[in-house]
């Protein structure tokens, strides 16, 4: 048969358990009856705490519902604003088309000039060539072995084909024995 007064198990930190044991030894009561008496004297405080916690939970639920409704309303107003903006943009584009349509049609009518036909040699029908450029490396100002040399420039770069010997020792290493 179940007990009229339910039992609970309580875990206490060592310091609290020591104080409870000391109090019980002074009063001569058991630990469970002492804890029960302390909790019964705090019953009005527990009841008030329960009421406050229930009210807080109810307010939190109502606030969540209100936020949900507010979010739905906000989303609806954003959609309506977007629709109005798109409508205004459409009107602006229509006005732009009206204002620039004539200009665009006039621009589309403009034709480009035809390409110039190359001049032909007299009676041959073959195109004239422009004066020939120098074909040889020497005529162009390059050394004869152009593949082995870099072009001359104003930065002090020498042709790769030039070899440094004792007359031109390497400048970087300081070694003049080469």
Image: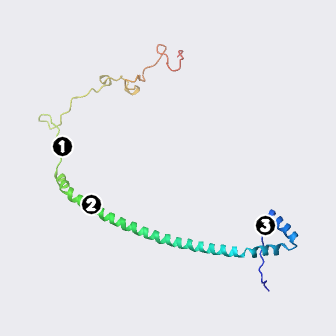
- For the residues labelled 3 and 2, the Cα–Cα distance comes to 75 Å
Dots 3, 2 in contact, CB < 8 A = no
Relative to the observer, which residue lies in front, 45 or 152? 45
Q: Residue at x 39, y 28 (%)?
A: 147
Q: How busy is the neighbourhood of tag 2: few (under 14 within 10 Å), some, or many (20 plus)?
A: few
Marks 1,3: beta carbons within 8 A: no
Viewer-proximal residue, 52 or 140?
52
- At label 1, counting other C-alpha atoms closer than 10 Å, the crowd grade (few under 14, some 14-19, many 20 or more) is few
What is the CA distance from the residue labelled 1 to the residue labelled 3? 101 Å
Q: Is residue 152 visible?
A: no
Q: Taking 107 as reference, is 172 above or below it?
A: above
| Residue 76 in the image, given as x and y percentages of width and height | 41, 69
Residue that protrudes farthest toward the bottom in the picture? 1
Tag 3: Cα neighbours inside 10 Å, few (<14), some, or many (≥20)? few
Mark 2 or 1, nearer chain start? 2
For disc 2, the marked residue is 92
Callout 2 secondary element: helix
Asked which secondary structure carries label 1, the reply is loop
Q: Is residue 112 left or right of residue 84?
A: left
Q: Is residue 69 left or right of residue 134?
A: right
Quadrant of res 26: bottom right
Q: CA distance from mark 2 to mark 1?
A: 40 Å
Q: Which residue is mark 3?
A: 12
Please tell me the numbered disc located at residue 115. Answer: 1
Residue 105 rendering spot, x and y as whole percentages: 18, 55
């Amino acid at each position: 048969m179940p007990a009229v007064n339910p039992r609970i198990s309580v875990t206490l930190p060592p310091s609290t358990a020591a104080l409870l044991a000391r109090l019980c030894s002074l009063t001569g009561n058991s630990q469970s009856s002492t804890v029960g008496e302390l909790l019964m004297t705090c019953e009005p405080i527990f009841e008030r705490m329960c009421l406050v916690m229930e009210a807080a939970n109810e307010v939190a639920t109502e606030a969540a519902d209100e936020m949900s409704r507010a979010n739905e309303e906000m989303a609806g107003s954003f959609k309506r604003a977007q629709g109005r903006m798109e409508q205004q943009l459409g009107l602006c584009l229509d006005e732009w088309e009206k204002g620039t349509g004539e200009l665009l049609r006039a621009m589309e009518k403009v034709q480009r000039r035809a390409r110039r036909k190359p001049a032909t040699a007299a009676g041959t029908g073959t195109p004239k060539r422009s004066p020939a450029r120098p074909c040889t490396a020497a005529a162009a100002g390059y050394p004869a072995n152009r593949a082995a040399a870099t072009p001359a420039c104003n930065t002090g770069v020498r042709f790769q084909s030039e070899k440094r010997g004792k007359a031109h020792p390497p400048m970087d290493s300081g070694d003049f024995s080469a």
